[in-house]
Image (tube, grey):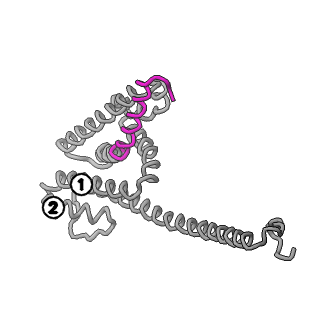
Amino acid sequence: MTDDPDIERRRQVAERIERATRLPMVLLSIVFLVVVAIPEVVEVPPDVDEMLEGVNWLIWAIFAFELGLMTYLAPNRWRYLREHWIDVLTVLVPFLRSLRMLRIVVVSVRLWTEARVLIYQRTFSTVAMTSVISALSAATLMYVVERNGDGPIQTYPDALWWAAATITTVGYGDVFPKTPAGRGIAFLLMLIGISVFGVLTARVAALFVEASDEDHHSKKLDEVLARLDRLEREFASRPASQPTPPLPRQGEGAGG
């Protein structure tokens, strides 16, 4: 806590912004990884590559704005930059064209760092938002790369249906990509679907374990309260002239 009201106000604003933007930043990191990885996985047409590059720079601009804003609000700005070095790398790496693949590594680390806290705090909303954003993004990209081909995905509703079936790991097979770019998008969406629902399954199992532990502790507490209530009634029923016997130690019986 600091005595400077301006610094304290900035710190409080920064905490509110960080809580509000954690989920959007995680989702943007996922989209960023997708648009950077697709040209590395498959060969895409020049117009698609240009569109992906535009999305890439738009997300980078959002990352840069967030870093600048949070650095301004930080009480100690140099310390903030040192502690959030991965965010600094996220902003700097895109300028190094020869290190294009490094962007995937840096943003993956950023995604993992932010997602750990977010998944624990808001598992179900995180899973829902990640699924929706990933499906919509994949459907849009799939429609762009498949609409002029001879495959079954010719309309945006077809692409949405394919994305929903793929991310939920159902995979009906009635619509499917045929171009190399479309198959690359499908591969990435499959990985996201498996990861997202794996996290959901693990969290649901953890909730059952936590509920079981709470029930166990609740029973123990009820037993302790019942014993205290019984002792209180025994003390209240004794004559005032009768001395109060010492409480038995744990493990001693009534006649010990």
Give percent across and percent down for residue 192.
36, 56
Residue 15 inside the magenta-drawn segment: yes
**At label 1, which amino acid type do we have?**
Leu
Q: Which mark is residue 120?
A: none
**Callout 2 crowding tier (Cα within 10 Å): few <14, some 14–19, many ≥20:** few
Residue tagged 2 = 157
Residue at image point 82% right, 68% down:
241
Give percent across and percent down for residue 153.
17, 61
251 horizontally vs 150: left or right: right
**At label 2, which amino acid type do we have?**
Pro
Marks 2 and 1, how far apart in space? 11 Å
Q: Where 159 falls versus 235 (above or below)?
A: above
Q: Where 9 falls versus 114 (above or below)?
A: above
Disc 2, disc 1: CB below 8 Å? no
Give percent across and percent down for residue 39.
29, 44
- Residue 55 visible in image: yes
Give percent across and percent down for residue 250.
79, 67
User: Dominant secondary structure of the magenta stretch?
Assistant: helix
77 horizontally vs 147: left or right: right
Q: Which residues are magenta?
A: 1-25
Residue at image point 44% right, 35% down:
86
Residue 2 inside the magenta-drawn segment: yes
Q: Which mark is residue 136?
A: 1
The numbered mark, 2 or 1, whose residue comes first in the sequence reads 1
Residue at image point 29% right, 35% down:
62
> Could you say whether the residue bearing mark 1 is in a helix, strand or loop?
helix
- Residue 40 visible in image: no
